[in-house]
Every structure is written in C-alpha cells, then in structure tokens.
Amino acid sequence: MTGPLSPAHHGLDPEHGRHLLLQMLRIRKLEEKCVELYSAAKIRGFLHVYIGEEAVAAGVLDTLSPEDAVVATYREHGHALLRGVEAGAILAEMYGCLEGCCRGRGGSMHLFDAATHFYGGNAIVAGGLPLAVGLALADKMAGRSNVTVCFFGDGAVAEGEFHESLNLAALWQLPVLFCCENNLYAMGTALGRSESQTDIALKAAGYEISAWAVDGMDVLAVEEAARRAVDAVRSGGGPHFLEMRTYRFRAHSMFDPELYREKAEVLKWQERDPITLLRRSMEAAGQLAGEEWAQLESAADTEVAAAVDFAETGTLEPIEELTRFVYSDRRTP
C-alpha cells in the first residue's frame, strides 16, 4: 500500500485544492449515480466505475492544454468528464440516446469526443496504446507541440501492444505520456500472478523511457508528477511513463462477483480514499471550512442531477437509422 500524503500538501493554494476536490467529487458522484442507474436497468451492457481512482484522472488532466490528446480505457467516464465532455452527454450515451456523445452507439465503454480531443473509451485491453503512439507520431510529423496522454491498467502490461507501443515511442522519441493505472488486479487476476516483475515503471525504463511510480491515491502527488512529465514531453524530452499505484473500491464491473480479493483488503485501501485524504488535509490546515465542503458536494450533486434529467428526456435512434454509419450511404448519380 502507498504511503502518507505527499510533501506537495504543504503550501497548497486553498483555491486549487478546492478545485481538485470538486473534480474528484464530480467523478465520484457521477459514478455512484451510474451504479444506481445500472441497478435500476436504466443503463445496460457492461459498466466499469472509477470509484477510488479519481486522483489519477484529476491530477493528470489538470496539467494538459485543450489541444492535447487523451486516450483512455473502458473505465473512462471520469476522464471524459474532466476532459470537458458534458455529464449529460455521457449519461445520454449510456442510455443509448441520440443526445449522447456518440449518438448512443458507444455506450459506457466507448465514450469519444473529437471536440475535446478525447479519443476513447477503448474496450480492448491495451488497445489504446497504439492509438496514442499514432496520435503522438502525427503531432511530431506536423511539428505541433501537443502531448498525447494514454491511460491504461496494469492488465495491459501483459499484452504485446504494450511492449510494441513503448518500443516505437522510444525509438521515434514521440511526445506521449503513458499513465498506467495500477490497481493491482487485471479484472480478477492479481498482478503478482501474471507478471514476474511487478514493478511496472521498471519495465518501462527497460525501453529507455523516463519512468517512475506515483502514489495514485494522492491527487497532489499525481499532479506534481504529471506536470513534471508533461512539461518534459512537451519540451522535446521524448516519451515518459508514470505508474499510478491506485485501487478501485468496487468490483471490476457490475457483473463481477469479486471472489479474488478479501473484503479486509478493500477496507484497508478505503482508508486512503483520495477525496477524504485531501479533504482532511485541507481541513487540518484551516484551508477548508464545513460550508465550503457542503458547497462542493452540492455543486457535484446538482451537475449529476441535471445530467440524469437530460438523459431521461433523450431520444432513441429511429429504427430506419440503425444501419447508418455501418454501411456507406448510397448516392444517386
């Protein structure tokens, strides 16, 4: 388990701290609502929530510019939200409505929004890594100063795409930041059961990539590491790699019976809830009053409630449109 709070908590600007708290709360409230809606059969298919890992998305995405690209996995609701995809468009997508960010065709695992440079939502394990390499290669060839950030889980390390992507990124010195969200379990397989070397940052370093591990439950430690890495990548320092050591508090998916880990382990990790850690740290430093916390919670609750209302009033795609985007349009001469 990761250690105490980062030294970055000392001298924290209270306004920025409240911003990060709100960002994590927005994810937590949205994901809790998703669980509720899934249980009520409003959301169908697969659903993988990010509860417990909010510090990673909040810390990393806060360091990016609007032109940078973001590639994520099927546990991507929080990344999409903080990248700028409206909560209503996210929930409408899960409802299968036309008002969703992908017209209801992608669902929970395939959120995508070109306007915010959010390129998935990729349901295939490690599938996003080659895409990130391609995006970064395009930026380098075009002479743009953009950075591509790729999020993936520890399960991706066992896939060939992981090694191929890191190798090419290093060979071509591409402007890409790889962020491994190591929550210790690839679906139901403990990291130590699939990898002889469990230090994932060390694996990345083997490709001559600057890499280090970060306490993924500490949003300020994440932000500090991400800013250092993003600045280095943007200034021509080549690919960088961060292993975010984090933990998901809920099962892998809503279908997961979660027989592979002990409840005591989950409870132990919940003691380092990233939202609670930052909140208590700020309260102890006199940087967060009770009414300020209540305002943050209220803002997140209001956003999610409006998103639910938006999705509930969404429209389903007409049956005659179901083959659109599947087959090419027939054009008369």
Image (cartoon, rainbow, N blue to C red):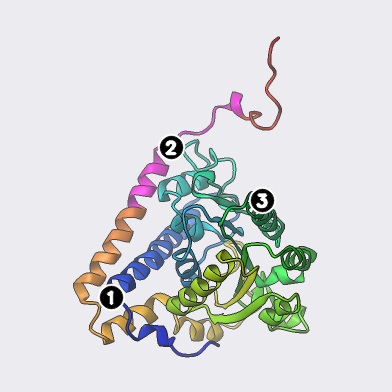
Q: How far separated are the C-alphas under marks 2 and 1?
A: 39 Å
Q: How far separated are the C-alphas under marks 3 and 1?
A: 39 Å
Look at label 2 and name its amino acid: Gly
Q: Is residue 64 above or below residue 289?
A: above
Name the side, left or right, on which 15 lies relative to 49. left
Which secondary structure, mark 1? helix
User: How many residues crowd mark 3 within 10 Å: few (<14), some (14–19), many (20+)?
Assistant: some
Q: Specify whether residue 292 is in view.
A: yes
- The residue pinned by badge 2 equals 314
Quarter holding residue 48: bottom right
- The residue pinned by badge 3 equals 138
Which mark's residue is nearer the viewer, 3 or 1?
3
**At 24% across and 65% down in the image, what residue appears?**
295
Residue nearest the observer in this picture, 18 or 205: 205
Give the image location of residue 10, x and y in percent.
Answer: 35, 86
Look at label 1 and name its amino acid: Pro
User: How many residues crowd mark 2 within 10 Å: few (<14), some (14–19), many (20+)?
Assistant: many
Q: Specify whether residue 52 is in view.
A: no
Residue range in magenta is 305-321
Which secondary structure, mark 2? loop
- The residue pinned by badge 1 equals 14
Which secondary structure, mark 3? helix
Can you say which quadrant of the picture contains the N terminus?
A: bottom right
Q: Is residue 78 magenta?
A: no
Look at label 3 and name its amino acid: Ala
Q: Main secondary structure of the magenta part?
A: helix
Q: Is residue 189 above or below residue 87?
A: below
Q: Are marks 2 and 1 in contact (CB under 8 Å)?
A: no
Which mark's residue is nearer the viewer, 2 or 1?
1
